Image (cartoon, grey):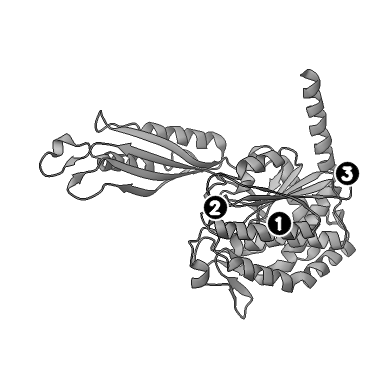
Amino acid sequence: MTTTTDSAVAAAELEALRAAVERARPAYLADLERLVNLDCGSYTKVGVDEVGRWVRARLESLGASVTVHPNDLGLGDTVIGEIAGNDPTGPTVLAIGHMDTVFDPGTAAERPYTVDERGIATGPGVTDMKSGLLAGLYALAALRETVGLPLARIVFVANPDEEIGSPASTAHIERVAADADACLVLECARMNGDIVSSRKGNAGIRVTVHGRASHAGIEPEKGRNAILEAARMVTSLQALNGTWPGVTVNVGTIEGGTRPNVVPAECSLEIDLRSTNRESLEAAEEAVREIARPVVFDDITTDVEITGRHWPMEKLERSGRLVDHAVGLAAALGFPLHDCATGGASDANTTAGMGVPTIDGLGPVGGYDHSPDEYLETGSIVPRTTLLAALIAAIGRDPDVRSWRLEREAKAAGSEDLA
């Protein structure tokens, strides 16, 4: 294996990229304000699709061939752009950014985009992840303006539903990831500037308990109290914490009953599981199913539904190669960079779980995602977007990454011969 150094992209090329991003900074900030001030929670299709139309136009202006994939779940459409590079024999890079936020309609009007005297921007989705989405698009623009795209192609996925587990877009991501040599996910950097090389996996589970209603005062014995059964489950589910290293279990919501004088016929629990590795996540899921078996009454029944799942993003050896490039390029740009593990899931879990070398957290620096205090350090926009652009170029030029593609193509050819 060759050694990664900051010479993967020459100093003059880095300066040209930085200057191009710096010139585009006012336009970036104007676009950031526009996108943050749109209500585009995962279930606000009209807002997500408005962002999608903007992304589509931006991709097309960069020379991309764009496909929009509608869905039948009432969510936003998935936008996928493909840009041909300058080297048909080079690798294919996949970039993923999401368009949705966790915020309800009206949030943008309540606390619109603002920037204070320190250069701290706030507003719904300012880091999670409008700034990362824009970093990807502006990095591509800087590359086209300066050093070009030294790869076969780059595929850009704008995901409409990441905040709810990507139910509509995962199939599209998996399809394009199957032909990718590396994947860059554009979530914001951690608050300390770290990029992300591994993430916990998560599973959302809904347990619905079906009992039987009756009059709570006249004939309570004829009822089967679904809340009582659910309460028994809650304590057992929470007791799973600590059973496996790196696994957390949280019963986040409980809902049931109609009124105090009725024995409740139904109750549901929403459970969040997280794990650092797939084996433990599968074991925890099975434990939840076992706990969900009714024990209080024989004639109570339960349904267990997986509402969403991301397998853990475990750090692949080849992902480490991408980290090395990022660290070397950051040093050449004048700032330190480290990779880390984090507990939140993203679309990086999907691609890494497929074996695609993947790193995440490549957007600008910010924090307090999913809260009214969410913020972005606008001073990080230029260095982080420059880093992203340089990283794409370095991946395209890396002979090791190119060898991964040749290896994969050889395996595919061998499989076809055996067929």
How far apart are the two marked residues, 3 and 2, measured between alpha carbons?
35 Å
Q: Is residue 190 above or below residue 85?
A: below
Q: Amino acid at mark 1?
A: Arg
Q: Is residue 191 visible?
A: no
Q: Quadrant of the N terminus?
A: top right
Regarding mark 3 in the picture, which secondary structure is present there? loop
Question: In front of the other: label 2 or label 1?
Answer: 1
Regarding mark 1 in the picture, which secondary structure is present there? helix
Q: Amino acid at mark 2?
A: Glu
Q: Position of residue 41 (x, y in %)?
A: 53, 58
Residue at 77% from the left image edge and 47% from the top image edge: 93
Q: Position of residue 24 (x, y in %)?
A: 77, 70
Depth check, front residue: 318 or 261: 261
Q: Which residue is mark 3?
A: 88
Question: In front of the other: label 3 or label 1?
Answer: 1
Quadrant location of residue 26? bottom right
Q: Which residue is mark 2?
A: 163
Q: Is residue 239 left or right of residue 186?
A: left
